[in-house]
Image: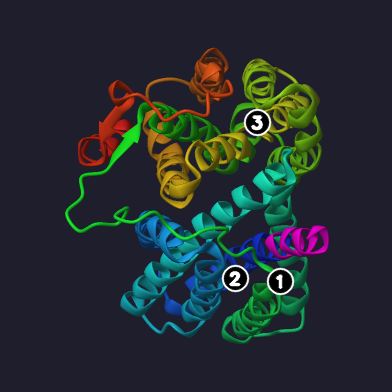
Amino acid sequence: MQRSLRAARLATFVFFALDGFLIGTWVVHIPAVEHRVGIGHPTLGWLLLLLGAGAFVGMRLVGPLADRFGAHIVVPVSAALCASAVVLPGLSANVWTLGMSLLALGFGNGCLDVAMNAHAVRVEHRYQRSVMSAFHATYSLGGVLAALVGARTLSWGWSSATALGMAALLGLVGAALAAPALLRPESPRPAGVFAVGERRVTPRRIWLLAGLALLLMLCEGVANDWSALHLRDVLAAPPATAALAYGAFATAMTVGRLLADRVATRFGSMAVLRYGTAIGAVGMLTAALSPWIPLALVGWTVFGAGLSGCVPQLFSAAGHADRNAAGANVARVAGLGYLGVLAGPAIIGPLTHLAPLNIVLLLPVAFCVVAAVAANVLRPQPSSAAHSADLIPDDALERAAPRRVGE
């Protein structure tokens, strides 16, 4: 039994790394694909929204499927979809085919994201200790590997189609090798759970977790899109130095996620969220208000370290809230969180017309403070079923969800 559990954990690491590697490979080849198709940055920006739209649809669709058929089936199928779709942008000849390719890639990535997180929740439950953050760190390491491999293949003169095709092949082989080790469902689904026309309800706690994921992943999106620009435009750093801001943030995120499971096991996930977001707020405040480049880099590093373990704890809590609906609950939290990543540029950009960028960056500080105050949502729950007063119809909240990101 322990051997099979260790094998399942290793297989989960493989799928997280594969997802990071596949998406990272696409990111590395964005400039080459843009040049090949003959489009400019504004058009590419609009097309990337299709990537996000496909991911959101995939997340919402695959969660219930993982609950019904089991992650051991849905994870490898999703990985195969993502791997097969990653080659499509490299084959695109015009803006229309590129748009459809990005929609397909986003869909496959969204499916894999939720399916592998749902399986990670099952592995974590069997281990009886926190292991979720390490899985997310492996995703980041997959992206680092993609950057290194991409740099090498580009130096060899490989075309985007060839490089993305090799990544797709690696993804398919890796998924096939890791799939047999995934955990099977422990018991059949209760009768009637998926009855046609059934009006499902979701605990308020799940939507609170989703709201916090929205805020914190928006903070991550701000770091992805604005950290280098902050150093360059506010502190007049040279381009090479400005790039270190995102590098410092991403490195701190990866290292922090490798360590966060031990912290969560010893002090609890609530402490990780509360003190992690508090540390993140201090880091972002330091970066935003610093007049010196070295201190700003320290601030971005602390920001990444503070946020590193927070979102995995939210995913874990959503999955453990109801093991019979782990996939659907993870999909809700991941879906709103992903909207936060997409909303980051949309929110920060317009605000820079009203105030300097370093002042606008105080908004993530406020989000971190809100998350720290709301960390009680991760307080361990009683094993009994939720009271009916704590339930909200899915359709009402799904209609309300887009308004949370200003749509």
Whichever of callouts 2 and 1 sits on the residue coming sooner in the sequence is: 2
Q: Residue at x 57, y 16 (%)?
A: 372
Q: Residue at x 53, y 63 (%)?
A: 71
Mark 2 in CB contact with mark 1 (< 8 angstroms) = yes
- Say whether residue 359 is visible: no
**Few, some or many C-alpha atoms within 10 Å of disc 1 (few <14, some 14-19, many ≥20)?**
many
Q: Residue at label 2? A: 29
Rendered position, 215 above or below 72:
above
Q: Which quarter of the rendering shows the N terminus?
A: bottom right
Q: Quadrant of residue 280?
A: top right
Q: Residue at label 1? A: 150
In depth, the one of 287 and 149 nearer the eye is: 149
Mark 1 vs mark 3, CA separation in Å: 28 Å
Q: Which quarter of the rendering shows the C terminus?
A: top left
Element at label 2: loop
- Residue 307: assigned label: 3
Span highlighted in magenta in the image? 1-12
Mark 3 vs mark 2, CA separation in Å: 28 Å
Position of residue 283 in the picture relative to residue 321 (left or right) = right
Element at label 3: helix
Whichever of callouts 3 and 2 sits on the residue coming sooner in the sequence is: 2
Residue 321 position, x and y percent, is: 50, 36
Q: Is residue 396 magenta?
A: no
